[in-house]
Amino acid sequence: MDIIDRRPNPHGKNLENRQRVLARARAALKQAARAAIDKGTLREVGHDQAVVIPADSLHEPSFHKVFTSGKREFVLSGNREFSVGDKIPRPPGGKAGGGDGSGAGQDGGEGEDAFRFVLTRDEFLDLFFEDLELPDLTKNQILATETVVPVRTGISADGAPSQIDMARTMRLSMARRIGLRRPKSAEVLALEAEITALEESGDQPERLAELRAELALIQRRLARVPWIDPVDLRYRRYAASPKPSARAAVFCLMDVSGSMSEHMKDLAKRFFLLLHVFLERRYKRVELVFIRHTETAEEVDEQTFFTDPRTGGTVVSTALAELVRIQRERYPQDSWNIYAAQASDGDNYSTDTQHAVSILEKDILPVVQHFAYIEVAASGAVIHGETDLWRGYKLLSERAPRLAMRRVADRRDIFPVFRDLFGRKMAAG
Amino acid sequence: MQSSLLYSGTNWDFSILRRSYDAIERIALDELELEVYPNRIEIITSEQMLDVYTAHGMPLTYRHWSYGKRFLQHEASYRQGFSSLAYEVVINSNPCISYLMEENTATMQALVIAHAAFGHNHFFRNNHLFRQWTDASAVLDYLEFARSYIAACEDRHGTSAVERVLDAAHALSSSGVHRHDGARPLNLKADQKRERERREHDERMFNDLWRTVPGTRPSLDTDHIGERRRLLGLPEENLLYFIEKASPRLQPWEREVIRIVRLISQYFYPQPQVKLMNEGCATWVHQRIMTRLHETGQIDDAAFLEVLHATTNVITQPGFDHPAGSGGFNPYALGYAMMSDIERVCVNPTEEDRNWFPDIAGNGDPTGTLRHAWANFRDESFVLQYLSPAVMRRFRMFRLLDDTTAPTLLVDAIHDDAGYREIRRSLSRAYDPAESDPDIQVVDVDLAGDRRLMLQHRTRLGRLLAERDAQATLAHAAALWGYEVKLEEIDSATEVVLATHTARAPAHR
């Protein structure tokens, strides 16, 4: 009997099979992933969330009989009150399970109608953001040099024992042993065996003496020429090399004036979250800056940004000016990829719109990778006429490709709009 | 007699495992006279247990999405606490591999060793079905071969091409076993070589046959059809075998892949037929061994209570109307009850037992009688032979007649003198694979015409194939055959065609 401890064996034996299932059910899973988003917030959804897809896409068919008419009989256990001749009403939905007894391996074939998956966050987001690309990747080359990684830089004669290059060391050792004619252990054994044989038989004494002298010589040589000498040792050499890592700053601008309802803020929030998660997958480091504005603008933390109610009028240019200030102060254009998204209901003091558009054009668009403007409307609102801000931006967007603008009225529009903004065609264009 | 405790408390280590194993082995071999393959015990984690589940308890398999699907299903239900994992999985191989979960307590490890490494192991080694159909010493090698062969095919022909063949072969795998050819033990290793030679020969023969088709036909005599069917070895119930040998369109590697699926399916063929006996045997053996360990003072009372608790859980039989019950019989419960009952009949029979089992009642050799039963029966015949009135009463069995023309179900037998034999016969029938497996055969190939493959399902009205699945499976068959496949469902009594399905081969393969 052997006892083998398999626990240290490599894990994830089924990883490959798992990926194949995902590939096979990709279309259905994509649907499910997007439906899941509608229910929860993106951050929560990403974490080991189960998605449910119709079992059809993974069905494994086989020939099996079904009972539809005629007679059949089956034996059950647990009789309490029945005697022969009793009639029992049929249980609703057929006699589940009891049909063919327990002897046959029953095929659940058509019984299952849904299939639950638990996806990892990465798998989930992969499905979710499939086909999406970052617009204007030109500036991706602008990188911050902050991480240092060890890089192989050849071989050296000294180093830490953990870095010994075994193959090379042994090669040198062997070359040296051959060069210095170190006797092989087989030779020594053969010699010793021969000596023992001669000792036992007792003949050829002169040959015996000769052999003994030879053995002594060999052993001396063996002691002088070591198996591995310090001169053989070779180590892998590493040098610290700075590794550029891309990073991005995302400015989220939101109008929190009285005209923005909770529903509108919710729409805006979803859009910002999508943007954040999306960028997080492309950049090592993503920094978020939340700027809210009424007739004045201020930078706030995430919590306040989404939850703290404010009232007041609306002056959009203040937020844009704040963006410019923060960007110049903390996120120099040459070392950050800058994205900005603005959500608003389109209201603005009419005198301010011109000012806002000019800040956007002169100070913001030249430094950002992409500026998305989302105009949110009350739920179910019929598309009203163009707002003041929309008209102003519209003119600008015709000459500035980095400015994208869309309208969103309902939660389910968020994702299509997002796809629309970041679909692959944008990257190509 | 050893009297010191093997262990105390719940923690185990490898020396405890070894001591427990040795003590269990002494009882199993000396007292119960079990005959087992050499054992190999492997300790695994819960994730690894999920892996083993996924592959139907095979230690290794080729890659296919369906295993991933199974893994995800088990994982989801395990994570959510819907189901707990088995304490062990045992492989019918030589050496016999038992997987033990690391989470088990010392007592559970001992119980599981007794259950799997001796109970199941003895059954695998001695039951006639396993002896006829599987070659325990070759299976591990064969699985290894299968995995590397399919991986090589994926490298050469692309994953999707291999997946297409595997999908189709899996769909047909339940019709891919020889059911009546039991005289020949399935020696996978030697088989492999011999079959390959034969296949090459068959392919040559077959090409000749096809080439002669469109030209002038020398003989149009009446025996032509018979001659053709004889040449093709028809009728043939093993669809995969026939397709592998005779499909005109398959590449050699595709035939080999089909063959792998077919042989693995054949390896698993006996398992569902003896599930009741296998589990009953293992449960009876572990209970007996653990009881002996307790009697001889090798485990303490606490450990024995844990054993009783575990066994009781396993052999629960919910009644037909219990929400937890599926309506059928728990193979552990019925199996264990029947084994214990045989023991009782041998040692301490009643008058009734003497009437029902004159040959074994009071023979005083329960272990010998059980060993004989384990070796020579399968579930169907075992129930027919050994299900006693005492067990039927204990399970309070009754029989329902389901006549779809009647508005209600009829209780037509209960556990009384009039009903015992009826119930026993019906329950035995429920364990007969011929009752539930569809009888599908290849009957003809239209060589002269469009090379259509003709299948026949012999059945009776009201027992047709599930329509949607039949169509999907037939499409897989057509993909492998390369031409149209037609399946007729025929009433075996009247030869009336009840239903017809056809599937065309996909235009581009």
Image (spheres, coloured by chain):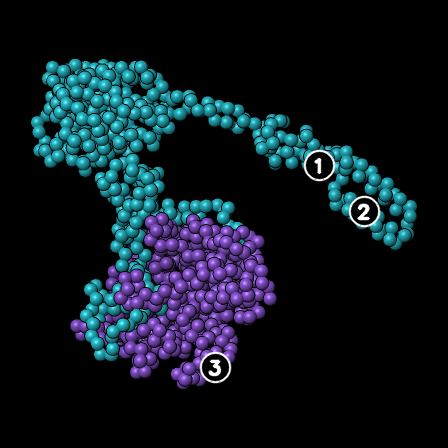
Distance between mark 3 and mark 2 Cα atoms: 72 Å
Q: Are marks 3 and 1 in contact (CB under 8 Å)?
A: no
Answer with left or right where residue B168 lies relative to residue B501.
right
Q: Which mark is residue B362?
A: 3
Subunit ID for the residue under disc 1: A
Q: Which mark is residue B83?
A: none
Callout 3: 10 Å neighbours few (<14), some, many (20+)?
some
Q: Which residue is mark 1?
A: A227
Label 1: state its secondary structure.
loop
Residue at the image position 32 percent from the left and 47 percent from the top: A117
Callout 1: 10 Å neighbours few (<14), some, many (20+)?
some
Which is nearer the eye, A77 or A92? Answer: A77
The C terminus of chain A lies in quadrant: top left
Q: Upstream in the sequence, badge 1 or badge 2?
A: 2
The N terminus of chain A lies in quadrant: bottom right
**Chain purple in the figure, letter:** B
Between disc 3 and disc 2, the foreground one is 3
**Chain cyan in the figure, letter:** A
Same chain for mark 3 and mark 1? The answer is no
